[in-house]
Amino acid sequence: MTQQELIEVDLGQRAYPIHVVAGGLDGLGLALAERFALGRVMLVTNPVVAVHHQGAALASLEAAGFEPEVIHVPDGEGCKTMQTWTDLVGRLLDARIDRVTPVIALGGGVTGDLVGFAAASVLRGVPFVQVPTTLLAMVDASVGGKTGFNTPQGKNLVGAFYQPRLVFAATHVLSTLEPAEFRCGLGEAVKHGVIRDAALVDWMEEHSAALRARDPVATAWLVRRCCEIKAEVVASDEREAGVRAILNFGHTVGHALETALGHGSLRHGEAVMLGMLVETRLAIQRGWCREPGMLARLIHLARLLQLPVHLPEAPLMHADRSFRDKLDLAVRMDKKTVRGTLSLVVPIQMGAVQLQSATAEDLVALMDLTESWENS
């Protein structure tokens, strides 16, 4: 691919570009200058990201003529809370921003979700920019406008659809990412292939070694293709009234596992990979999936990408009634549950999914995830 590619999220007057840059953050300021008048901008990041990337982001913004100010929010899924959001809103108001002041999220999915919901809320909406620094955020979370925070009842139960004005994905920033965090993004990338593009799954199998090694060419290609898929889906259904629901594949079970284990105990991409396996297993049992060997293929791909196929706590699941109760409650609290019935995304073959109805009991019964479950 070229040094920089633009992907348009076609939402009419709310359309915005995704810059996929096979480089660093030096072009960030110029990209913003194409969309905004020069002046104040608020750069919101977290201490972990700030060590590596805050300086480059500030230098780029200042070189382009902007006047950046920095706010730090806590890092990690466990900090994606109402209190963190409230504190951020207060700091933005204390900074006396106005309705044309861009607010930039520099970080992973947690930072982007929190900053996006704050931008949607302050002054009833200020311009929002996503600068993702994790692979998971680049391939998925930064695109599409879903924002919010977690509650004790479940993942992302409070939030809003609020589209960014710009996404700037500079793949060189991934060099500072912990290996486990990088692999999480690969889990979301697998999801994109299963729901929409069988050739992407083929490609990830063929290039699994390059992806594990974080080869820059392979990584940049993966980010671009996943952004293309996400942009197409979001453009056709911005607020998840129909086809956009396919992006939830793996997330009903994945979110339930994250909630039952405690937010932050299981990385999101790991939970989604486990969720895809469980939901595929249900599709096979119900006869919805018509591709022989699909579950075995996904398990093999997960292992190639060094993603989990079992929970560390799996041997306890049969005996631990409280954990199963937590899982059951988390599934029932899923946003897609209506009168006790889930609208569940299930694969029918590689590259194609459909919505089917299921119950919490259907899913929890399949979530033992012991070392023998995959042969059942």
Image (cartoon, rainbow, N blue to C red):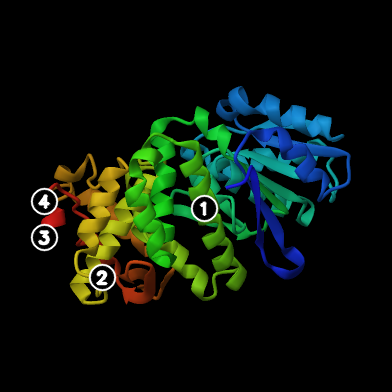
Rounded to the nearest angstrom, the CA distance separating label 4 from label 1 is 31 Å
**Residue 308 visible, this orientation:** no
Compare marks 4 and 1 and give the one earlier in the sequence.
1
Reading the image, the residue beneath label 4 is 372
Reading the image, the residue beneath label 1 is 140
- Local SS, label 4: loop
Q: Residue at the location (48% across, 49% down)?
A: 222
Which of the image's four quarters has the C terminus? bottom left
- Looking at the picture, does residue 141 appear above or below residue 366? above
Please name the amino acid that badge 4 sits on: Ser
Is the Cβ of the residue at disc 3 closer than 8 Å to that at disc 4?
A: yes
Is the Cβ of the residue at disc 1 closer than 8 Å to that at disc 3?
A: no
- Looking at the picture, does residue 369 appear above or below residue 71? below
Please name the amino acid that badge 3 sits on: Ser
Is the Cβ of the residue at disc 2 closer than 8 Å to that at disc 4?
A: no
Q: Which mark is residue 283?
A: 2
| Whole-percent x, y for residue 35 in the image | 81, 51
Rounded to the nearest angstrom, the CA distance separating label 2 from label 4 is 19 Å
Reading the image, the residue beneath label 3 is 376
Q: From the viewer's perspective, is the residue at label 4 or at label 1 nearer? A: 1
**Residue 167 visible, this orientation:** yes
